[in-house]
Image (cartoon, helix red, strand yellow):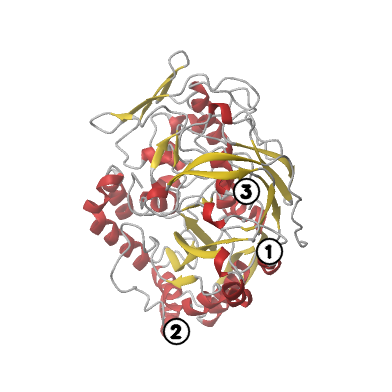
C-alpha cells in the first residue's frame, strides 16, 4: 500500500492538545503475543499524522493511514495477528471466517464458512453475501488494490468492465454461511489478500458511491466517527463488539482521536512534550529532533524495519523515460546518501524494489552504482546525451509533505544536473495518490513508496509493475510498464504458496535485478518506521504490527 514483507506467509496546522481522558476506567484481560495481560480500559489518546487517509471509506482507501484504522473497524474473513515482530505479526488468522480456508489441490478454489450470529454496529446481521457486495463495491469505486481481485478471481475483471452483473467466481450461502471463491489460476498469496483491509464485510444496503465522511457500517472492535475532512476523526470503541469478540482480535482499551498536523516538526514535538500521544508510523521524524528524542525519550521511541520502499517512478510511455538510457541515467545520478540525510537517518540507501527483509531482495551490486556512495553525475550526464533526450522537459510530481517535498526538490535538481529541464508539480498530500493514480493524468515522474500489505514479493510486483494492474482509476503502475519478460516471470511466480517462497527466492532476485537494470522504478531507500508515544501510554502493552503499524487496540493509559 502506499506509505504502506516479511518472510513467512503463515507470516499519516496547529499544536495538538491531548483530549482529557473521558469515560470510566476499568481493567480487562486481553491476549497479546506473550499471553494474557491485564490492562486498564478507558480514556482517549491523541494520534497526530502528517496527512489524512486517502479515504475513511474502506472500499477506496489504500494508504497506511487508512489501513491502520480499517483493519480494526472493518473485519474481513481473515486478518493479521495482533502481534509485534515480522514473524508473529505476519501470521494470517481467522476473523469473520471460522477457520482458515479449505484450498483445492490445484490451488484454484477457496472455501470457508463465516461465524453465525455476528451483528454489525447498527444491529444488522453479517451475511456471507456481504463480502461479495463489498468486493464488487470496491471495484466499482476504484480501489487502488483492485488488481489483487481482478487478476485472480473468476469474473472480477468482467464485472469491473461492466460486461457482467456480478462476480461469477464468488458464490455464497447466507443460510449456511459458506463462501466459495474460484480463481483463474493458482495464486499463492490469496489468503493474504483475504486478510487485506478493503476485503471486508459491509452490508449490501451500503450505497455504491464514495462515503468518506459517513463511512459504511462494519464489524470490528472500533467505529469511525466525528469526521472533519482533512482535519480530524475519532476511532472509538465499538460497544457491541465485546460480547461477540473474536479470539485474537482484541476489543481495545481506549478511544483514539486522530488529528492531522502537516508540519512534522510540530507533530514530533507534541509527542516529545506529551501534548499528543502517538506519532503516526507513516511519518518521518525531522532530522533536527532525532537526537533530542533519542536522549530525552528513548524509553518511548523505537524504530522498526517494516519493509517500506521509497522510489521515483518513471513513466515508460512518454519522453524522455520511454528511453532505456535516459532511465538508466536517472538511476545512476540519484543522490541516495543526500536523500537518506533528508530522511533523518531513518532511510537506508538502496536501489531495489524489494526491501531487504523481503524474500527476493537481490544480493548483487546495484546496477546504477553503490547506493551509499556519491553518484557519478558526469557519467549520468553523458548517458543522457547518448540517449538523445538532453533538454527534454520533465515534470516531477511531488507530495506536499515533509520530507517528501524535500526529496522531490533534490530529485528535480539531479535531473537538471544531468541534462533534463525539470520542474516541480506539487500536489496536496491528501489527494496526491488519488491524483497520480488517475491514468489519464499520465504523471511523468515523481515520488512514490510502497509499504508491504502482506509478506510476499507478489504484493510489490502485482501492484507496481504488472501490466495487468494498469487501470483508469486506482492505478499503482505509475510507470505504465507492460514488459513481456516481467509478465512471463510473474505468471510462473504468482502460484507459489507463501510457505514455499524460499524455493523461488533466486528467481525473484533475478526478476528484481532485471527491473532495476531496466530502471522502470528508481528506488533510493528503505525507511524505518517510528513507534513514538507520550509518557501517558503504557509502553509495555504496545503492539507494533509489521503490516499495520501502531495497533490501536494495544493503546493503554497508565
Residue indicated by mark 3: 54
Whether 428 is drawn above or below 214: the answer is below
Q: Which of the labelled discs sits on residue 280, or is there none?
A: none
Q: Earlier in the sequence, mark 2 or mark 3?
A: 3
Closer to the eye: label 3 or 1: 1
Foreground pick, 319 / 414: 414
Residue indicated by mark 1: 267
Place of residue 315 in the rendered image (x, y in percent of width and height, measured from the top left): 49, 60
Q: Earlier in the sequence, mark 3 or mark 1?
A: 3
Residue indicated by mark 2: 374
SS at badge 2: loop
Q: How many numbered dots are placed on residues in this image?
A: 3
Q: Label 2: few (<14), some or many (≥20) within 10 Å?
A: some
SS at badge 1: helix
Foreground pick, 536 / 511: 536
Place of residue 259 in the rendered image (x, y in percent of width and height, measured from the top left): 71, 53
Amino acid at each position: 500500500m502506499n506509505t504502506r514483507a516479511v518472510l513467512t506467509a503463515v507470516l499519516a496546522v496547529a499544536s495538538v492538545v491531548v483530549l482529557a481522558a473521558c469515560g470510566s476506567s476499568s481493567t480487562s484481560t486481553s491476549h497479546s503475543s506473550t499471553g494474557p495481560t491485564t490492562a486498564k480500559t478507558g480514556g482517549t489518546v491523541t494520534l497526530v499524522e502528517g496527512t489524512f487517509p486517502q479515504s475513511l471509506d474502506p472500499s477506496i482507501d489504500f494508504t497506511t493511514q487508512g489501513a491502520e484504522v480499517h483493519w480494526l473497524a472493518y473485519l474481513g474473513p481473515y486478518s493479521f495477528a495482533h502481534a509485534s515482530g515480522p514473524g508473529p505479526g505476519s501470521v494470517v488468522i481467522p476473523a469473520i471466517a471460522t477457520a482458515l480456508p479449505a484450498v483445492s489441490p490445484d490451488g484454484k478454489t477457496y472455501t470457508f464458512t463465516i461465524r453465525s450470529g455476528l451483528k454489525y454496529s447498527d444491529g444488522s446481521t453479517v451475511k456471507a453475501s456481504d463480502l461479495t457486495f463489498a468486493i464488487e463495491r470496491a471495484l466499482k469505486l476504484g480501489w487502488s488494490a483492485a488488481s489483487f481481485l481482478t487478476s485472480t478471481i473468476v469474473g472480477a475483471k468482467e464485472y469491473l468492465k461492466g460486461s457482467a452483473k456480478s462476480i461469477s467466481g464468488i458464490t455464497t450461502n447466507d443460510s449456511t454461511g459458506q463462501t466459495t471463491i474460484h480463481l483463474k489460476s493458482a495464486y499463492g498469496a490469496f489468503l493474504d489478500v483475504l486478510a487485506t483491509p478493503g476485503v471486508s464485510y459491509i452490508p449490501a444496503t451500503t450505497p455504491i458511491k464514495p462515503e468518506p465522511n459517513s463511512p459504511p457500517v462494519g464489524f470490528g472492535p472500533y467505529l469511525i466517527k466525528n469526521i472533519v475532512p482533512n482535519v480530524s476523526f475519532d476511532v472509538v470503541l465499538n460497544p457491541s463488539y465485546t460480547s461477540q469478540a473474536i479470539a485474537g482480535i482484541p476489543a481495545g482499551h481506549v478511544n483514539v482521536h486522530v488529528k492531522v498536523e502537516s508540519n512534522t516538526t510540530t507533530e514530533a514535538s507534541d509527542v516529545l512534550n506529551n501534548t499528543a500521544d502517538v506519532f503516526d508510523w507513516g511519518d518521518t521524524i525531522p532530522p533536527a529532533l532525532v537526537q533530542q528524542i533519542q536522549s530525552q525519550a528513548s524509553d518511548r521511541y523505537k524504530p522498526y524495519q517494516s519493509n517500506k520502499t521509497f522510489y521515483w517512478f518513471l513513466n515508460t510511455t512518454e519522453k524522455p523515460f520511454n528511453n532505456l538510457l535516459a532511465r538508466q541515467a536517472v538511476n545512476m545520478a540519484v543522490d541516495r546518501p543526500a536523500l537518506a540525510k533528508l530522511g533523518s537517518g531513518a532511510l537506508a540507501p538502496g536501489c531495489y524494489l524489494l526491501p531487504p527483509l523481503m524474500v527476493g531482495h537481490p544480493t548483487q551490486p546495484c546496477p546504477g552504482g553503490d547506493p551509499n556512495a556519491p553518484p557519478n553525475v558526469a557519467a549520468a550526464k553523458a548517458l543522457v546525451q547518448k540517449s538523445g533526450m538532453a533538454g527534454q522537459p520533465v515534470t516531477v510530481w511531488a507530495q506536499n509533505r515533509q520530507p517528501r517535498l524535500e526529496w522531490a526538490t533534490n530529485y528535480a535538481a539531479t535531473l537538471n544536473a544531468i541534462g533534463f529541464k525539470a520542474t516541480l508539480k506539487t500536489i496536496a498530500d491528501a489527494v496526491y495518490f488519488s491524483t497520480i493514480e488517475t491514468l489519464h493524468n499520465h504523471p511523468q515522474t515523481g515520488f512514490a513508496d510502497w509499504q508491504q500489505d502482506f509478506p510476499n514479493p507478489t504484493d510489490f510486483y502485482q501492484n507496481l509493475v504488472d501490466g495487468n494492474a494498469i487501470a483508469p482509476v486506482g492505478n499503482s503502475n505509475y510507470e505504465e510498464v507492460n514488459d513481456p519478460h516481467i509478465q512471463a516471470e510473474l505468471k510462473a511466480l504468482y502460484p507459489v504458496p507463501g510457505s514455499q517462497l524460499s524455493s523461488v527466492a533466486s528467481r525473484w532476485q533475478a526478476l528484481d535485478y532485471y527491473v532495476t537494470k531496466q530502471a522502470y522504478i528508481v528506488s533510493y531507500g528503505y525507511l524505518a518506521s517510528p513507534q513514538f508515544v507520550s509518557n501517558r501510554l503504557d509502553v509495555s502493552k504496545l503492539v507494533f504490527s509489521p503490516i499495520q503499524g501502531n495497533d490501536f487496540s494495544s493503546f493503554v493509559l497508565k
